[in-house]
Amino acid sequence: MARIEELYEAVLTGDKSTAEEVTRHAIGTSVDPQALIDQSMIPAMDEVGRRFEEEEYFVPELLLSARAMKAALKIVNPLLSESGGKHKGCIVLGTVKGDLHDIGKNLVSSMLEGAGFRVVDLGTDVSPEQFVAAVEENDANLIGISALLTATMPSMKSTIEALEAAGIRNRVKVMVGGAPLSTDYAKEINADAYADNANAAVRTAQDLTGA
Ligand code: B1M
């Protein structure tokens, strides 16, 4: 339990080397990697966000915390991605145009891989045209769009419209996610589903593809 608190503190204060050291040690003592994410890293980032809103933290602190969380996730990710077996479907994943937040999206990516999906991760700041091209190139049956900024949410709608314009909307399911989203917003933009966390994203992907 102490390790979980130390990791929380390390991410909150942007202490990358401690975050790495604590994560390695916790995994070595068979702490559940999912618990490290759910009980330390995500709550720490929520607190970082709260401090940012309260103007106790500024962009440099956000960056340091993000760097610490990414370093810890890099150690945990291979454990989430151990799948084996044949692929259950192909998902094109990315963060929408104008949006550089990728920690949650990367987590979703690892969990989907762990569940046996082939993930084509386009990264961040992905335009509707890039999403469409990747779906066509990879013959994907699912597309996952992430947004963390209210200002970039409309680009999800543009992406769905671009799929329609390309005539491929009916052969690809669309899952959306990210902190500012909701089921209502997903319906409003004609997405097939909204998932509010990485575990839900896996369950939703399985439901949408029948995997
Ligand atoms: Co930014 N940022 N940020 N930021 N940042 C937020 C999102 C914010 C809420 C902070 C705040 O004010 N409280 C706020 C947005 C406000 C709004 O739009 N309403 C904000 C802002 C304002 C900004 C800037 C504009 C700041 C500035 O420059 N003045 C700027 C924008 C840059 C840009 O994108 N163009 C900016 C920049 C940054 C950093 C680059 C410094 C850094 C990101 C680093 C990176 O990602 N590589 C950063 C960070 C770290 C945050 C906070 C603190 C943490 C985000 C995070 O990683 N959370 C964030 C506050 C917060 O969210 N509490 C904040 C942990 C992560 C695991 O959770 O991403 O929610 P999350 O993912 C979850 C679920 O949402 C879900 O599953 C994940 C795992 O459970 N999920 C999906 C996500 N995608 C999914 C997709 C799915 C399904 C589920 O299917 C496809």
Image (spheres, helix red, strand yellow):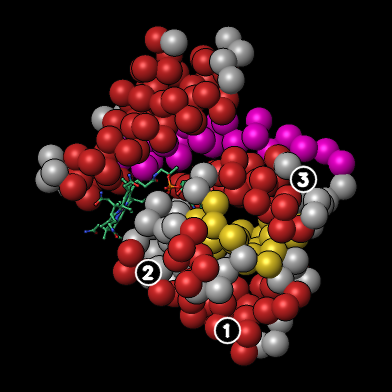
How dense is the environment of label 1, judged by Cα within 10 Å: few (below 14), some, or many (20 and up)? some
Please give the label number shown on residue 15.
Answer: none
Question: Would you name the residue on which mark 2 appears?
Answer: 152
Task: First in sequence, mark 3 or 1: give its number.
Answer: 3
How dense is the environment of label 3, judged by Cα within 10 Å: few (below 14), some, or many (20 and up)? many
Image coords of residue 98 (percent x, y): 38, 70
Image coords of residue 47 (percent x, y): 27, 35
Residue 32 occupies quadrant: top right
Question: Would you name the residue on which mark 3 appears?
Answer: 116
Question: Would you name the residue on which mark 1 appears?
Answer: 162
Q: Does residue 202 appear in the picture of this structure? A: yes
Q: Is residue 126 left or right of residue 115?
A: left
- Cβ–Cβ below 8 Å for labels 3 and 2? no
The residue positioned 57% from the left and 84% from the top of the image is: 162
Q: Main secondary structure of the magenta part?
A: helix
- Cβ–Cβ below 8 Å for labels 3 and 1? no
Quadrant the N terminus occupies: top left
Residue in the foreground of this view, choosing between 105 and 76: 105
Work out whether 151 lies above or below 170. above
Q: Which residues are magenta?
A: 64-85
Mark 2: amino acid: Thr
Between marks 3 and 1, how big is the CA–CA gap? 28 Å
